[in-house]
Amino acid sequence: MTLRIGPVTLAHPVLSAPIAGFTDRIFRDIVRDFGGCGLIYTEMVSAGGWVQGNIPPDRLNRVDDEARPLGVQLWDREEAPLEEAARRLVDLGITVIDLNFGCPKKRIMGTHAAGATLLRDPATVGRLVAATRRGAGSVPVTAKIRLGPTVHARTGPAVARAAADNGAAAITVHGRTAGDGYGVPCNREMIAEVVQTVPVPVIANGDVHDAASAVETLRLTGAAGVMVARGCLTRPWVFREIAAALAGEPVPESPSYLDQRALLLRHHAEMVEREGERFGTVAMRKFAVRYLTGIPGARVFRDHVTRTETTAQFREVVERFFPLEGHTTTEITEVAEETCAPL
Ligand SMILES: Cc1cc2nc3c(=O)[nH]c(=O)nc-3n(C[C@H](O)[C@H](O)[C@H](O)COP(=O)(O)O)c2cc1C
């Protein structure tokens, strides 16, 4: 199974989603190191903020010396800043430029009338894609959408068509509306409808967290690839599992708990190197909590790690509460809960 985005052929039809607050350079390097990811995106970047402020945003820190392929996601509701930001991304050697038409955050939808608000207006989506393409030259432009603004306005297929008609090289569809919370199941039938509507590759997104859910999503939607967001915050090695399954190869083992513990310490050390000890440790808390989701003893670990402020405290929590190999789930939970003295 091959996924082509315009002139770019991905090594694997598995993409790492833009995740604001998470997919920074340190996390992207971790994902790359595990392998299996065909394309990794930055966090979303405000085109207007960049163009008016003239300084590359923090979210583009160190993209110049990063491995490729690399996708950057832009958001805006005006043509001129998108065109100019795209031109600058071409100069930075970015592989794919994605446009955000799915963000449901109040600040983006309300104050800026961008993100998922634009799902109400396929014609504007088309104009924004066309403007971005003017700046992007031969670099492919993609659109990331939802099924619509609400369940009563499932505009996804119309928006996807407007984007494709104006030159989008692929469309990613998150199978929920902007009004849906994560409690609402991802609607794969509606993603399939978008697949039927546009002539360009569609990437299915939503609730893909392992090889089985990826295979099932592709089967039910007919999409050309899958994109993973929350699943990779817990298991950044998920891409190699999905890539192997799609290639008909045996799915590799998860890293041992000891390796996962080493990963936590590596990630923390890199955050501290970038941000300093206190800010780095505080910024690491949200990653640490995500890494542990669903792992035995996670609750106890979370309670402690979210109070750490120094490297010594962070390491102590990891040493004390990160589950060890060779224990059963119940044992680990019991041991962790018994030893849960406040730090
Ligand atoms: C913390 C967080 C930040 C996100 N930031 C972005 C973003 O910057 N751009 C975007 O298009 N989607 C963003 N998303 C949405 C995801 O990319 C994805 O569409 C959604 O989580 C569904 O995929 P999943 O079920 O694999 O998590 C974000 C999601 C989360 C949980």
Image (tube, rainbow, N blue to C red):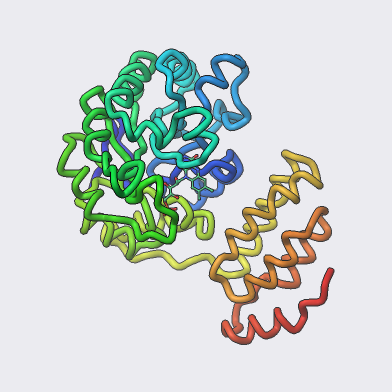
- The quadrant holding residue 155 is top left
Closer to us: 255 or 22:
22
Camera sees residue 180 = yes
- Give x and y (percent) for residue 8: 31, 31
- Give x and y (percent) for residue 191: 25, 49
Task: Determine whether 265 is above or below 170 in the image.
Answer: below
Count the numbered circles shown.
0
Please give the name of the residue rendered at 36% of the width and 57% of the height, measured from the top-left corner. 242
Please give the name of the residue rendered at 62% of the width and 18% of the height, measured from the top-left corner. 55
The quadrant of the rendering that contains the C terminus is: bottom right
As drawn, the residue found furthest toward the front would be: 152
Residue 242 shown left or right of residue 42 in the figure: left
Task: Determine whether 59 is above or below 323 in the image.
Answer: above
- The quadrant holding residue 170 is top left
Residue 204 shown left or right of residue 63 in the figure: left
- Give x and y (percent) for residue 97: 40, 28
Closer to us: 28 or 17:
17
- The quadrant holding residue 249 is bottom left
Closer to us: 247 or 316:
316
- Give x and y (percent) for residue 337: 71, 81
Please give the name of the residue rendered at 63% of the width and 86% of the height, measured from the top-left corner. 331
Camera sees residue 6 = no
